[in-house]
Image (cartoon, rainbow, N blue to C red):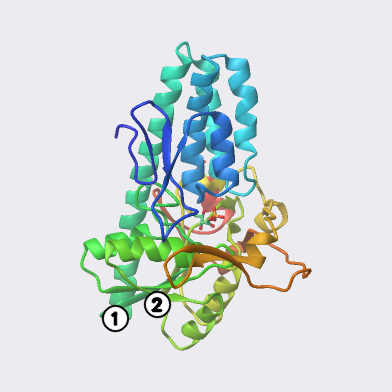
């Protein structure tokens, strides 16, 4: 790999170019990030999102800081804290910045070493997602065999595809692998209010890949599971605690409850750098991002002429609450699909990954 990944790459000037995810699925725009401050802003304003990609972009953010401050270790370390704090829940962000700062502390050639390390972090994530794809798809084949299924229905929430982690995604990686293996697969895509990452990003990825899928309003999953129309749920994660509790996009917990009630296997796919070994109890200790009320009040789309519009869908003066994530307790999770294999959601199994 040479610093070119599907959602982000280094341009000819050595700046970081990213797909601006705020405009998908209607416009494929990119944004060039020149400085560490550009990176913090792009993470905060959701130009880039998804735990893995936030970490990847943050790693390059520390490289941009190294360039900006001509290798001044004190300045880089100080400014990197702003990137590290740009979103609170996805632990890949903190993990990537901390790993970059170790390089800064030890290096004699800070700029070159930061660039190499950021590329290395992304390269490792590419391999992680490929392994997740293979291991997850083996589980799909196993369920199909046990239940004598000729086709397979997966439900997913939010976007955990290649827009969320280079280069195959986490939750979508087994789905891409299933397509490569010729398995007839269909994906139920939760729209994922309020920002609609499922309807706008996951649907866009799956359409582009030619994978059969159907967008469903967020409240539909329970009904589908009750009617036997879902063979497996796979989501990604933003932070998983040592006890196996897993934070992911708001609404994931409700899907896990419905899956439990209907005996539908509920898997979370994640690279091992999404485990937070310092966090003992996810439900109690994971910090949940509160986002702007506007994301609930306003909807973005195109009008009948295909022109981008933002419209309000709530009465002026009504209050809205916008919790970005929720935590699914370990007892509702069948297993974690990671590059290190299938992991039981408990402290003993997770501790072995340290
Ligand atoms: O708020 P977002 O869009 O960053 O939330 C993303 C998710 O919740 C994803 O499911 C998660 O980050 C996994 S992506 C590899």
Characterize the local packing of mark 1: few (<14), some (14-19) or many (20 or more) Cα atoms within 10 angstroms. few
Relative to 36, is 296 on the left or the right?
A: right
Kindly give the residue lying farthest to the left in the view shown. 182
Residue lying at 50% horizontally and 66% vertically, measured from the top left: 301
- The quadrant in which the N terminus is found is top left
User: SS for tag 1?
Assistant: loop
Left or right of 250? Residue 117 is: left
- Tell me if residue 186 comes above or below residue 285 in the rendering: below
- Foreground: 337 or 9? 9
Measured as percent of width and height from the top left, residue 47 is found at 51, 47
Where residue 72 sits, quadrant-wise, is: top right
Q: Is mark 2 within 8 Å of ligand 1?
A: no
> Which residue occupies the extreme top position in the image?
108
State whether label 1 is within 8 Å of ligand 1.
no
Give the percent coordinates (x, y) of residue 318. 77, 70
The residue that appears at 54% across and 76% down in the rendered structure is: 260
Q: Is residue 331 visible?
A: no
Q: Residue at x 37, y 26 (%)?
A: 13
Image disc number at residue 231: 2
For image coordinates 70% across by 55% down, the residue present is 290
Check contact, mark 1 vs mark 2: CB within 8 A: yes
Please name the residue that numbered disc 1 is placed on: 149
Q: Position of residue 228 (x, y in %)?
A: 43, 86
Identify the element where label 2 is drawn: loop
């Amino acid at each position: 790999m040479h610093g070119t990944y599907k959602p982000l790459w280094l341009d000819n000037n050595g700046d970081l170019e990213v797909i601006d995810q705020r405009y998908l699925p209607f416009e494929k725009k990119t944004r060039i990030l020149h400085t560490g401050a550009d990176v913090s802003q792009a993470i905060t304003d959701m130009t880039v999102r998804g735990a893995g990609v936030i970490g990847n972009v943050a790693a390059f953010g520390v490289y941009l800081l190294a360039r900006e401050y001509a290798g001044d270790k004190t300045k880089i370390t100080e400014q990197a804290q702003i990137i590290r704090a740009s979103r609170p829940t996805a632990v890949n962000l903190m993990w990537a910045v901390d790993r970059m700062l170790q390089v800064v502390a030890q290096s004699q050639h800070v700029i070159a070493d930061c660039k190499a390390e950021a590329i290395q972090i992304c390269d490792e994530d590419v391999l992680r997602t490929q392994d997740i794809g293979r291991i997850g798809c083996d589980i799909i084949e196993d369920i199909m065999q046990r239940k004598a299924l000729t086709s397979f229905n997966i439900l997913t929430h939010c976007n955990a595809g290649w827009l969320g982690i280079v280069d195959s995604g986490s939750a979508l990686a087994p789905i891409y692998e299933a397509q490569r293996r010729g398995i007839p697969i269909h994906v139920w895509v939760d729209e994922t209010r309020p920002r609609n990452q499922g309807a706008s990003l996951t649907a866009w990825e799956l359409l582009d890949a030619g994978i059969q899928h159907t967008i469903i309003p967020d409240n539909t999953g329970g009904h589908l599971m009750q009617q036997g129309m879902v063979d497996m749920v796979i989501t990604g994660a933003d932070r998983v605690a040592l006890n196996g509790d897993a934070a992911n996009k708001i609404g994931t917990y409700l899907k896990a409850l419905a899956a439990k009630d209907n005996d539908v296997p509920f898997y979370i796919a994640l690279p091992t750098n999404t485990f937070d070994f310092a966090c003992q109890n996810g439900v109690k200790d994971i910090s949940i991002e509160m986002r702007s009320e506007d994301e609930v009040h306003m909807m973005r789309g195109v009008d009948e002429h295909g022109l981008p519009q933002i419209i309000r869908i709530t009465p002026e003066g009504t209050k809205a609450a916008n919790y970005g994530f929720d935590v699914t307790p370990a007892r509702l999770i069948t297993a974690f699909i990671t590059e290190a294999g299938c992991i039981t959601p408990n402290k003993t199994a997770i501790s072995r990954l340290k």
